[in-house]
Image (cartoon, rainbow, N blue to C red):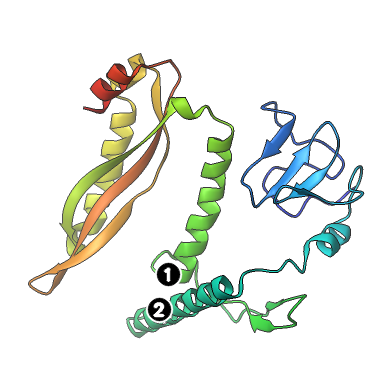
Amino acid sequence: MPAPLPSGERGEREGAPPRSNLTASLCLTASRELYDGESGEIKLSGTALPETTGVLSSADLWEKTIGKAVDRDKFIEAKSRERILKKQSHDIAARLEAEGINAYQEENGTTIIGLCTGQAEKANNFRNSNLIPVMQAKNIHDMFKHVRYYMDGANKKHLRMLVISNGWVPLSEYREAHKAFTRKISKLNSDPLLKERGLSFVYYNVENTIKRVDGAPHLNMHSHVLMRSGKRLGPNKWMETMD
């Protein structure tokens, strides 16, 4: 059985076209793989890999794609952001642990090794909690891969983004406010006007900004919503619906 392609997103096997009836060629973003169902070519960042028709092993793919040079300044900037994020994560984890909340899993024995640089570092063993910046960044990245995949195959004229705000909430009341807010979004998705116009929510998240009032933390709870129309709506209908 051939091994799956390293992207791990689409479920296709090496040597077989992607399981999609959108187009013969599926391209997620300019920096991802593109499989051409007619020629059998696999491309990376728009460049065809040599002799890649038919079955391609993971080892062959890695050999042809590792060693790509990146801009030195951008690399340093990215590593700097990564160090800051890790420091913030360990600081927050220490505060959680001091309150008796486990912020770490058992010791992680996984080590990440750079095939080109030879550098090695231990993989983090934080709990999968969005309170920890490193894990939040990872979860958002993984989630948005699915959102980008959906948008790449959809008609952009049928999509709209909107922001729904719940206003400022004291941290002590956040749990109940969060439940009430998500219920409101669910009810809004079932609104008769939206149903009549073929509109539905295909994705939403909940984000927060923070401020202090008399020393007490308050969170501004808001949601970014991706809306899809199953019918053709002109500009006036869209504006009327948004209002």
At a point 38% along the width and 47% down the height, the residue shown is: 205
Q: Which residue is mark 2?
A: 88
As rendered, which of 83 and 137 lies closer to the eye?
A: 83
At a point 63% along the width and 81% down the height, the residue shown is: 122
Marks 1 and 2 close (CB-CB < 8 Å): yes
Question: Residue 36 vs residue 111: left or right?
Answer: right
As rendered, which of 173 and 28 lies closer to the eye?
A: 28
Residue type indicated by callout 2: Gln
Count the labels in the image: 2
Residue type indicated by callout 1: Pro
- Give the distance between the C-alpha atoms of the residues marked 1 and 2, in whole angstroms: 7 Å
At a point 75% along the width and 82% down the height, the residue shown is: 118
Q: Position of residue 11 (x, y in %)?
A: 73, 43
Up-down relation of residue 161 to residue 52 (above or below):
above
Q: Residues within 10 Å of mark 2 (few under 14, many from 20)?
A: some
Quadrant location of residue 62? bottom right
At a point 88% along the width and 59% down the height, the residue shown is: 60
Q: Earlier in the sequence, mark 1 or mark 2?
A: 2
Residue projecting furthest to the left: 214
Q: Secondary structure at mark 2?
A: helix
Q: Residues within 10 Å of mark 1 (few under 14, many from 20)?
A: some
Q: Secondary structure at mark 1?
A: helix
Residue 175 is tagged as none
As rendered, which of 47 and 219 lies closer to the eye?
A: 47
Q: Position of residue 39 (x, y in %)?
A: 86, 35
Quadrant location of residue 190? top left
User: Image quadrant for the C terminus?
Assistant: top left
Q: Position of residue 216 (x, y in %)?
A: 13, 71
Q: Which residue is mark 1?
A: 133
Q: Position of residue 150 (x, y in %)?
A: 55, 37
Up-down relation of residue 43 to residue 156 (above or below):
below
Question: Residue 162 vs residue 13: left or right?
Answer: left
